[in-house]
Amino acid sequence: EDSFSNGGRCQCGATRDSHPSVALGDYFSTAMVSHWDSTQHSSEQPTDAYGELEFAGAGKRHSYFLRLSSTTDPFVVFDIMRQHWKLGQPNLVVSVVGGEGRSRVKSWVREVLRQGLVKAAQSTGAWIITSGLREGIGKCVGEAVRDHATAVSSVNLNKVVPIGIAPWGMVHNRLQLVDPEGSFPAKYFVQNAPRGTCSLDNNYKAFLLVDDGTEGRKGGEVGFRGRLEDYISRQRPGSASIDIPVLNMLISGQVSMLEALEISLKNSMPWLVLAGSGGLANLVSDIVENVQSAPMSAFGGEEEEEGSSNMELRERITMKVKKHFPSEQDMDKLVDKVLSIYQNKDLISIYHAEGVDDFDTVMLKVLVQASKQRVSMSTNPYVDELKLAVTWNRVDIAKSELFSGNIDWKYEDLEVSMTDALENDKPQFVRLFIDNGLNILNYLTYGRLEGLYDSISKTSQAGMLLQHLLEERINESNDQTCHVSLYEVSQLLEDLLGEVCQPFYRSVLRVDAASTKRKALKKACKVLKEECLYRQNMCKDPWLCLFLWAVLQNRGEMAIFCWEMVTWIYIISNFIRLHTVYSRKMIHEFTLTYNLIDCLKMAMATDARYFFSHDGVQSLLSQIWWGDMERGTELWKLALTMIIPPLVYTNLIDFKKAENTEEVKSGMAPPPSATDCNYGETVFSFADIKHNEGDHEDSNNIRQPTKGLFFYFKRPFWVSRWKQFWYAPVTSFIGNVVTYFLFLFLYAYVLLVDFKPPPPEGPAVSEYVLYFWVFTIVCEEIRETFIVGSKTFCQRLMLYVQDVWNKFDVLAISLFIAGLCCRMFSWSYNTGRDILCMDFMVFTLRLIHIFAIHRQLGPKIIILGKMIKDALFFLLFLGVWLSAYGVANQALLYQYDPSPDRAFRRVLYRPYLHIFGQIPVEEIDTGKYWDRDCTDNLTLINEGKEPCRDTSHNWLVVILLVIFLLVTNILLVNLLIATFSYTFSKVQEHSDTYWKFQRYNLIVEYHSRPTLAPPFIILSHINLLIKRNLRKVPSTKIHRFALQLKGRDANKLVKWETFQKENFLALESKKRRGTDSERLKRMTAKVDGVIKQVGEIRDVDRRLRALESDMEFCTSSLQWIMEALSQSSTVKSPKAHPTRKVVISASNEK
């Protein structure tokens, strides 16, 4: 029984009547039980209160709650919070203790919670643990979290998770939560609670309601809360390098909270005490700051000294306790607890509101100090502080506190944190580490790169693809302990990039780059089963490896940083700011760098029009287009030389001389000609990269170029000049254009003049020539689609179909084959001829593609294509009006007309002609005379006779005609004109960019084509067949897109790149500093500096006041001593005691 309730209540807080009969039996009295204990006088049962909690009228997401015993294992609770409640993994746990009850919280404490605690928790992704009740500090924290969540634009951006741990017996209306089956949700009403209970706060995410059998008693949750915090402090979030830091925060508080403070300190938990907040916080801060152990005397025994020291310390603490809690009864027990706390004062830090440091910085230092207590040996005392800063993603604290130049960081100190920053996507820390001594060449080994890929989330797209490839290797090697290796990475990149580049990391695994996927898998399994010594080697191109790793995970900021660090990619990406001569060389050399990435093809795949519009790219394309011929050559000279080939050995066409190479190396280039459509400047002779054979394989195949420098044997003049002319893409283009016009002329001649009847009378000889011509075109399409390149059949087919002109080719060839088959039989002869006539239109429209090379006509092709798309949408609107008007008009004019032919013409065809002004007024307007033989006899009408008009509703027909013409001729037609005008102006505005972009496709197409045009192209096909399959001569066509510079040229290019990079970075930095956001940041930093200095001044003022007080005490003490000695007869001095001189200021003297 509770002695204060006159037998009405038990010591557990419940009334006598609420206890079962077994608790009221005589055997309890015979046992002489005088003190109630939860472990002995209560029993545990399965929980009957759990699920989701809905606060009535709160209008927010549901919270989670769980009633549990005070002896519940923290592992089970933490697993429920993470797995079932889906609470995010915390990077920090802040446990706020104190300030309970109905006493008013000080305003500055509220500000610390709002601006300090919640802000720091948001920046770190923290859990805030309080009592969760709607009173005291718990209510203030809930309001601060609510205000912060309101300011955050998205729920996903709110990283603060408030959690309440409260005693079950203190919860008001707790019976609303009881449901043995679980509540989803339980509706909870917040009311003004009577004294002894309190309602739950609706601003918390989760509630842990600890039941120790008491009712209306505080402190039942202290033991469980301490064990849960201790368990969390030994967990490690994700791939972090440290355990979850737990920080206890004491605000105000009562004497009963000493137990929680004592238990937590015994578990080596750090505490942050808010000095001046009142109650227990003031006592603890006073003891930690002002109580010092008494110094040992130089005389006497050691035991006496220790005993006297402890007695003096106890007396001092007793004085402090009486000062702050004068009304406490059991003072000795209270002093013992305070002494126990004092023994662990190294784990206690004091926070003053007027301090110079920010609250989050103080939290960081407190946790670091606690970690140093746990870990005695450390190479650098600031390593733990750096790990915490990385875990919290507080690069600002790291810069101001750790990388200000006062600490000597070594590579070993930054290595673990660098891995943590990479795996957890913190690019600002990666940049910080690189700027402060971490060498990426020493850091990134192939083994560590495999670890980074193995850390990719298994639920991400890249992670699932890597796991699929890993399963294939596991099935092949029967090794279940495999991890992601460079083979899976290489295969994934090859699947994604295709033929854009050579396979990555194959050489590291000693796998041939040209081997098939099956052979590569077997070789990789064999290498990985052995001792993988390659994992100790440093990555050849670390930033490129990290760039690809970041891109695969869709980490944009990290990828951009790595992208900037890769010199080649960085410079290429900002081509618009570079000089033409060197940028032209860079495209060449870039193709041979970083596993032969074809930057032009990458730009094409990403639709980078501005990249292609740069002069450097256009100069390269012009170089390839004209070959070794001077770009000032007129087109009529080329056409005449093609007709009369011996003219190639005359001076009719100018070819580049070998001296041009030296001219370009000195930065000189001939001026562009007017006939070159302003392609850009020629930068150096094509002889530098000319191929040594007449090969015309696809230029996209860049699998394996010849290594090293290219050596060419000097050929006879007549051979070299012949190749220089006929192997230029411009020659191939003109030849194809001329022959295509001849093909269309032959096709038209066959259709109009020489189309014979079916066999045996036909076809004619000219028609057989046409068949052979089309056959050579089909052979070229097959070569272009299925023979060139190293992709699979399906990949090549999909790539081929993506080009709209290839679709035209397929349509034209299909129609020609269908028409050819039909014209061979008498029963389908006319159908075949019709199909061939339609096919002639398709072949003729294919001629539009040739205009892409022209600067003025090229953009018009794009405009035409976009206008066709606009017209399709217009036809949808027009079709609606045509069908609506046509059906209504036909039904009003003719009551009965069963003829489908007449119905179709009058419903769709006739309204369509109305748009162009062909309106049969005599038929529509019955007031007009209509000279047409008609009848109203249904029998004759059914036999096909023309029915007569219905004149009863003719006025409605006229009205519908007026409305139809108004909508179609005025509204829809003008809408179409406006749409066409917008499309034209939009494309015309960037016509030069569009033209340069599509010019690349045309140049690549004719660069990859054989020199001879159909039908003579069959000779080139036979030559290629012999060369590739019989003579095994590899293709060297790639050399037109790749140039390997060495020696002085390479050094000059690297220097120029570095210079341009620094200029660009300086310019971008200047622009960034000039933005309003950066100015605001600088102003904020200055204001923060001023506030910090003001805080320091206040701190100095406080210390001066304390020093002044001490000096006054010392002065009064010395004065007392002097007076005592002067009155004493023991000591007599012949001199008088000194007197204090009065200091007069200069102003007073004046």
Image (spheres, rainbow, N blue to C red):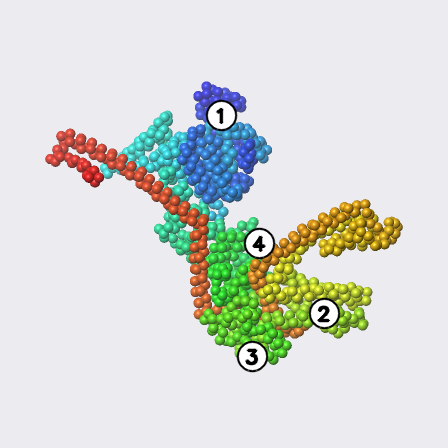
Q: Which residue is mark 2?
A: 747
Do the residues under discs 2 and 1 have CB atoms within 8 angstroms?
Answer: no
What separation in Å lies between label 4 and label 2 (alpha carbons)? 52 Å
- Confirm whether residue 444 shows in the render: yes
Instruction: Give, as a three-letter code, the residue at label 4.
Output: Leu
The residue beneath circle 3 is 651
Q: CA distance from mark 4 to mark 3?
A: 60 Å
Q: Which residue is mark 1?
A: 194
Of marks 4 and 3, which one's residue comes earlier in the chain?
A: 4
Residue at the image point whose x is 78% and y is 64% from the top: 831
Q: Nearer the viewer, residue 696 or 439?
A: 696
Ranked by sequence position, the earlier of labels 4 and 2 is: 4
Residue 903 position within the rendered picture, expressed as x and y whole percent measured from the top left: 79, 52
Label 2 crowding class (10 Å Cα cut-off): few <14, some 14-19, many 20+?
A: many
Rounded to the nearest angstrom, the CA distance separating label 3 from label 2 is 37 Å
Q: Is residue 290 left or right of residue 663?
A: left
State the mark number for residue 98: none
Residue located beneath label 4 in the image:
465
* Quarter location, residue 363: top left
Q: Residues within 10 Å of mark 3 (few under 14, many from 20)?
A: few
Amino acid type indicated by mark 2: Tyr
Query: Residue 693, can we see it?
Result: no
Whether the residues at callouts 4 and 2 have beta carbons within 8 Å, the answer is no
